[in-house]
Amino acid sequence: MTLESAGHPLLRQEVAKLHLVNPDDVLIITPQEGIYIAMHCLVDYFSRTYGDDRSHVITTYPAYQSLYENLHTLRCQVDYWMVKESGDGWYFDMADLRQLIRDDTRLLVVNFPHNPTGYLLPEDQWREIIEICERRNIFLFSDEMYRLSNNDQSAPLVSACTAMTNSVTLFGVSKTLALPGLRIGWLCTKHSTLMTSMKSFRDYITICCSAPAEILALIALRNKNEILKRTLAIIEKNLHLLADFFREYEDVFEWRAPRACTTGLVKLKGWLLRLGNGGAKGFCERLQEEAGVLMLPSAVYEFDDNCVRLGFGRTDLKYALIALREFLRRNKP
C-alpha cells in the first residue's frame, strides 16, 4: 500500500495536528465510506478478539442512519441511547446509558454535537463516557462531523481519538468547514491494528480519494480559523433570525436553540400537525410542494412524527423564512 492510498501526506499531517495524533493514525475517506469501513472493521475485530457472533452495540438515537443500519446489516445486537426532552431542550441521560451497558458490550457509537437535535454533551459527561469505555473495555466510535460549531463560545469537546486508544473519530470538511462538495473526511484512531485493517478494507472500495479534492481540503485546513470565523458568524446571524421567527409563531412551533451544530429539532403544535396527511411528514410535504422549503420530518429518523429537522447553516435562511411565513399565512385556519 502506498502512503497516498491513505491520503495525501500533507493533508494527513494537518488532520493529525487538529486531533493531536500521528499522521499514521489518519485515513482520508469520504464520510459515508468511512462509516461503512469503520463498522465492518470494528465488528470483524470483535469477532476475532472475542469470538462474538453478534456483537452488542449502543448508539445514540435518533441519528444519521448509517451509524446504526450498518450495524444491523452486520447482525449486531443494537440498543438505542434515546434522546430525551425537558424544559431546557433535548438531552441524553447518562443514567440511561449506564443501564444499557452489558458485560458483553463491545462498542458505543455517539454523535456530538448531535444531528438532528444540535445537542452538545457537557464536558464532564463526555469525560465520564471516556472513563466508562476505558474501564469496561468498550470501543468508542465518535461521529464528530459538526465539531467546532459551538455557537455559545464554549470550547469543543476533545476528540475521542485524542482521548483514548480504543476509539475512532469521524470528521471532515463537509459541515463546519463548509466544503461538502469535496466529499473529504477522515477516520482517526491510535489503535494500530484497527487502522491497518481499515486501510486494507478501503483498498477493496475506492482505494483513494480524489487528489484535487484532497489538495483543496488541505488548503481549507490550513485556513480553518478564517473558515470557522465565517461559519460561526453565519450561525450567529441565523440563530437571531430563528429566535425572532419562533417568537412570532410560538403557538405552532416549539424551538430551543442548540449550543452547537447547524441543525435543530423543532416540535410542531396545533394546526400544523393537521396539514396534509397529518403529522410532521404531511407538513413537510406540503411545505416543499407549495413553498419550495425543505425540512425533514422526524419520521425520516424513525422518530415520533411531530418534529422537523431544521438546518440553519446557509446564508439564504432569511429567504426560506420569508417563504415559510407566507406558507403559514396562507394555510392558517
Image (spheres, rainbow, N blue to C red):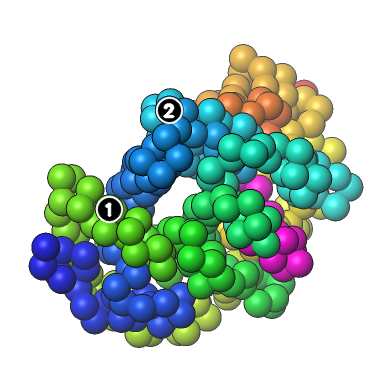
Q: Residue 55: where, in percent of width, then height? A: 49, 34
User: Is residue 14 or residue 153 the one in the foreground?
Assistant: 14
Q: Quadrant of residue 48?
A: top left
User: Is residue 252 or residue 303 the one in the foreground?
Assistant: 303
Residue at the limit of the structure toward the top, as seen here: 277
Q: Is residue 319 visible?
A: no
The correct choice, above or below, for 329 with respect to 179 in the image is above
Query: What is the count of numbered marks?
Result: 2
Q: Quadrant of the N terminus?
A: bottom left
Question: Which amino acid type is shown beneath numbered disc 2?
Answer: Asp
Q: Which mark is residue 197?
A: 1
Residue placed at 21% from the left, 68% from the top?
7
Q: Residue 236: where, in percent of width, then height? A: 64, 70
SS of the residue at dot 1?
A: helix
Magenta segment boundaries in residue numbering: 115-130
Question: Which amino acid type is shown beneath numbered disc 1?
Answer: Ser
Q: Is residue 164 visible?
A: yes
Q: CA distance from mark 2 to mark 1?
A: 19 Å
The correct choice, above or below, for 39 with respect to 174 in the image is above
Q: Which residue is mark 2?
A: 53
User: Is residue 249 or residue 82 the one in the foreground?
Assistant: 82
Q: Residue 274: where, in percent of width, then height? A: 72, 19
10 Å crowding of disc 2: few (<14), some (14-19), many (20+): some
Q: Quadrant of residue 318?
A: bottom right
